[in-house]
Amino acid sequence: MRKWKEKPTQIIGGLLLGSLVFGLWLSWPRERDLIALADPVVSLKREEEAYWVSASHLVIITTDHYAIVAGKFGVDDWHGHADLISLPSRTRTRLAGLTKLLNRVGVTPMGAPSNFALSPDGKHLTWRNLQHLGRLSYRIATANRDGNEYRECKWLEAEPTFWIDDRHFAEAHFDMFANAAKVHVLDIRDANADCFYEPSSKEAKAILHRYYRSLPSDRVLECVPSEEAHPLIQIGHYRDGERLIGTSTYHVWLPKGARPVERQTSPQMTAMLYDLRFETAPPLLVWLHHFLPGIPANPVIIEGLWISWADGTEMREIGHVPGAHGWQLVEALQWLPDGKQISFTYRNRLYVVTAAPPK
């Protein structure tokens, strides 16, 4: 009889203990560890830079050394090599022809080539060559993967630049006096067949109109420099082959205590990525301090990636890492071309994390 009376008591005690443990588990603070959420792709040396040219291909540009060009003041000719990494096998292949081209004197006079992208047919690469012509600027260049059919754009910092078809690459430049864009079309196989179209010409308008209609979005998303506590986002729209800026401006309400480090727009112009720094106490210490005041909850610096819609609404955290005062630990932010993933480097390793916008 005594054992029978003790058994319900043990059961009730067990249920109470289980409820307490379950309650503690529910209230236990959970942090979004960025590195735990991300997939490691490849280790990078300090002299290496990575550029996604598709969701499964990565161009690695490695700087070997610089050589001062005799008779050219301020020109340090870059020397290095280019590799292609294919996923998911992570096979690394030397792009010998492209490497030979990039090391040609005068091709990359002011530093490593950057911002590599793949043409629609996947046969050509485009990138930026840094130059110093009165001021530090760049020209867009293109060549196939073997380094052949090399062409360089005519204008500095041309915008936009795009492929018309597999053979013709176009650059546009806004003419302030004509209040319209002029267009230069490069024939990558025959420089003598290049075409130039004056601002507001029928041909220039037709080329730009076709380009804007081919974009994944009919708008342009930009971050506006601002001295205010909350950054500004500006959304313009494309209409009839013309770019209209400033149609809508939004304040981005960052999380409390956040200091913006960097912002990037998704390729589809639908979302915005933020690199933010906070000085805050770890949630676990805050939770413990609530029950045990003797345990200190001193603030530390963390750095995290956040995402919002294009207009800055519905911001949410992707994940964060512990930070060091004065140092940016999450570096080399890039959207992958599909707009569904983001890559970053952390302690000399490249990671990829899903970047689904808020629901």
Image (spheres, grey):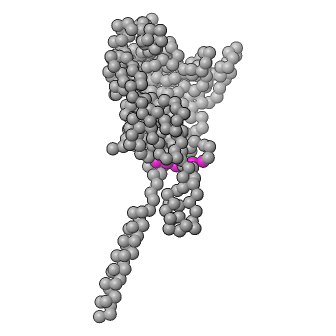
- The magenta stretch is 319-324
- For the image shown, how many numbered marks are present on the structure? 0
| Residue at x-position 62% and y-position 30% | 64
Q: Quadrant of the C terminus?
A: top left
Residue 99 vertical position relative to residue 253 in the rendered view, above or below: above
Q: Quadrant of the N terminus?
A: bottom left
The reply to whether residue 356 is in sight is no
Q: Nearer the viewer, residue 209 or 340?
A: 209
Please tell me whether residue 222 belongs to the stretch shown in magenta.
no
| Residue at x-position 49% and y-position 24% | 127
Residue 89 vertical position relative to residue 65 in the rendered view, above or below: below
Q: Which of 16 and 157 is in front in this view?
A: 16
Residue furthest bottom in the image: 1
Residue 281 at x, y percent in the picture: 54, 55
| Residue at x-position 41% and y-position 16% | 169
Secondary structure mainly formed by the magenta segment: strand
Residue 47 at x, y percent in the picture: 60, 34
The reply to whether residue 319 is in sight is yes
| Residue at x-position 39% and y-position 75% | 17
Is residue 210 shown left or right of residue 331? left
Residue 67 vertical position relative to residue 154 in the rendered view, above or below: below
Residue 72 at x, y percent in the picture: 68, 15
Residue 295 at x, y percent in the picture: 57, 65
Please tell me whether residue 320 belongs to the stretch shown in magenta.
yes
